[in-house]
């Protein structure tokens, strides 16, 4: 089967991607490619100058064909991705604030249900407008549970187990990344592919039944009876009953009264006091650079000479040793030095790649893999580090703000590629320079190794990150050997 596309005034194809294709072997050459459906061949007639580096995902291809996104409408297929990330930006801010206001568990359920419904609706879209709207809202929902899950997890853990549990949970992200490559290869229709990657939300929704609300958050909101019920229930689940005296309502009431400081958190609280403002500004720089360099590396991986499935699988495999490295380093040298070191490693790989000839493919491949490892390690560290820096009353709010700035960095990363018109190595130097600046900025943040989680703004302002002796921290430290916390 052959496909010929309308041509613009320049004589070039109006859209270079309107083909039923996406076979893993269709990389780097050849005009005949395997179609999405068995037994079909698609011959693409386009100038040889367009062949280099041109490898398009099947979703954009099918959207272009189904909704006639060619000629003057050809830019709309890329705008769909932009809409999705705009949704992620909005979702990070909205869900971060709402989870501090109404609770982690409730908003986590909202995020999961919204992602499931909107994802399935996207797969059933009957027009481009419907698809763009549902993908934007899906991005917001997905940002919701990525912002909420880690703070909720850390707020139930003591100091000794935060690193292991945080790294272990992020490993499932890596597993999903690798499975996505397999799903994309096996499922050739974009609607079924969207359904396949959306349905895992169902187990997440069902698991909410066993997920407790954050007892720390409940105490800061004065909801003592609920906090006591969750604490006692967790103890019973692990066969380690706790005496009523250690969790008496009177004792918890005294703690709760002392911790109720910010009944209605807002994003202004992240800049009102000096220490929180210092943490927020530094974290914004770090998050921007982590996303900027991470996506910059992904955009500059054409030297690997792999197709999109192989690249996705390789990058997912690289993440596993990176997470192991993070787990060891943050326990040995601390969060601050690990964050700065991983960003410095990413910056050095960018700098060295700018000096390596494009013909040295083996060296280029090794540097890309190393850069990916450092970038992923920086990503894993920044989630853990930021969650430990902010107090309980502002934790998801702070995560939402920093994630917003991080997504802006990811959105700007493709623009730096355009600098290669000025100098071929300039994009790499920009990516590396931003990462180096963030590495220096990370050194300005306080260390949280062996520190209890701060509960209130006052805990942070008094520089009590290590150690903190607020009532909630004392309770959790005393109960860590009897509750489920030491089961990890």
Image (cartoon, rainbow, N blue to C red):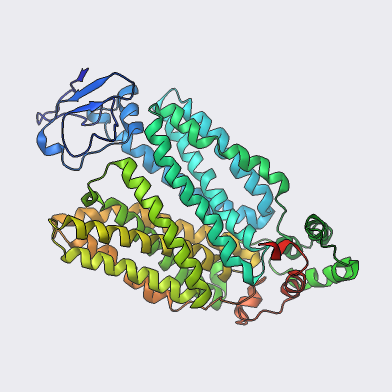
In the image, is 289 to the left or to the right of 271? left
Q: Which residue is drawn at 61% across and 64% down?
A: 394
In the image, is 159 to the left or to the right of 338? right
Image quarter hosting the C terminus: bottom right
Tell how many labels. Answer: 0
Closer to the camera, 144 or 338? 338
In the image, is 304 to the left or to the right of 89? left
Taking 184 as reference, is 428 above or below it?
below
Q: Which residue is drawn at 44% across and 76% down?
A: 337
In this view of the protein, can residue 282 be seen by the observer?
A: yes
Taking 277 as reference, is 266 above or below it?
above
Q: Position of residue 461 (x, y in %)?
A: 60, 79
Q: Quadrant of residue 272?
A: bottom right
Taking 449 as reference, is 306 above or below it?
above
In the image, is 340 to the left or to the right of 357? right
Image quarter hosting the N terminus: top left
In this view of the protein, can residue 433 be seen by the observer?
A: no
Closer to the camera, 438 or 312? 312
Q: Which residue is drawn at 34% across and 39% down?
A: 79
Taking 337 as reference, is 309 above or below it?
above
Q: Position of residue 413 (x, y in %)?
A: 31, 55
Q: Where is residue 431 in the image (x, y as percent from the top left)?
A: 28, 63
Q: Residue at x 59, y 44 (%)?
A: 111
């Amino acid at each position: 089967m052959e496909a010929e596309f309308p041509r613009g005034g320049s004589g070039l194809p109006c859209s270079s991607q309107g083909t039923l294709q996406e076979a893993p072997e269709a990389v780097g050459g050849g005009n005949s490619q395997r179609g999405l459906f068995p037994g079909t061949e698609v011959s693409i007639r386009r100038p040889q100058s367009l062949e280099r580096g041109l490898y398009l995902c099947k979703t954009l291809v099918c959207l272009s064909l189904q909704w006639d996104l060619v000629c003057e409408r050809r830019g709309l297929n890329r705008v769909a991705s932009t809409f999705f990330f705009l949704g992620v930006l909005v979702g990070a801010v909205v869900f971060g604030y709402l989870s501090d206001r109404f609770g982690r568990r409730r908003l986590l359920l909202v995020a999961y249900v919204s992602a499931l419904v909107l994802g399935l609706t996207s797969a059933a879209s009957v027009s481009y407008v419907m698809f763009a709207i549902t993908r934007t809202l899906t991005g917001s929902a997905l940002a919701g549970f990525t912002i909420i899950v880690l703070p909720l997890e850390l707020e139930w853990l003591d100091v000794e187990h935060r690193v292991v549990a945080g790294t272990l949970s992020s490993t499932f992200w890596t597993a999903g990344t690798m499975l996505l490559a397999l799903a994309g290869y096996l499922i050739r229709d974009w609607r079924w592919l969207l359904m396949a990657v959306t349905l895992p939300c169902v187990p997440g929704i069902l698991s909410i039944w066993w997920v407790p609300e954050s007892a720390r958050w409940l105490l800061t909101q004065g909801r003592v009876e609920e906090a006591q019920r969750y604490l006692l229930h967790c103890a019973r689940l692990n066969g380690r009953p706790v005496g009523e005296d250690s969790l008496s309502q009177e004792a918890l009431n005294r703690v709760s009264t002392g911790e109720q400081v910010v009944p209605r958190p807002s994003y202004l609280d992240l800049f009102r006091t000096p220490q929180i403002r210092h943490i927020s500004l530094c974290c914004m720089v770090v998050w921007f650079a982590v996303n900027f360099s991470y996506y910059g590396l992904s955009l500059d991986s054409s030297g690997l000479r792999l197709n999109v499935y192989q690249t996705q699988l390789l990058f997912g495999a690289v993440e596993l040793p990176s997470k192991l490295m993070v787990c060891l380093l943050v326990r040995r040298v601390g969060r601050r030095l690990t964050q700065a070191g991983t960003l410095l490693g990413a910056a050095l790989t960018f700098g060295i790649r700018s000096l390596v000839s494009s013909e040295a493919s083996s060296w280029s491949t090794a540097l890309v893999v190393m850069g990916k490892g450092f970038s992923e390690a920086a990503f894993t560290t920044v989630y853990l580090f930021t969650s430990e820096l902010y107090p309980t009353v502002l934790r998801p709010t702070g995560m939402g703000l920093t994630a917003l700035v991080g997504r802006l960095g990811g959105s700007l990363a493709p623009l730096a590629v355009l600098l290669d018109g000025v100098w071929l190595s300039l994009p790499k130097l920009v990516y590396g320079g931003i990462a180096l600046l963030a590495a220096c900025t990370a050194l300005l943040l306080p260390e949280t190794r062996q520190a209890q989680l701060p509960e209130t703004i006052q805990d942070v302002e008094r520089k009590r990150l290590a150690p903190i002796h607020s009532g909630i921290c004392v309770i959790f430290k005393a109960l860590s050997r009897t509750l489920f916390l030491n089961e990890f």
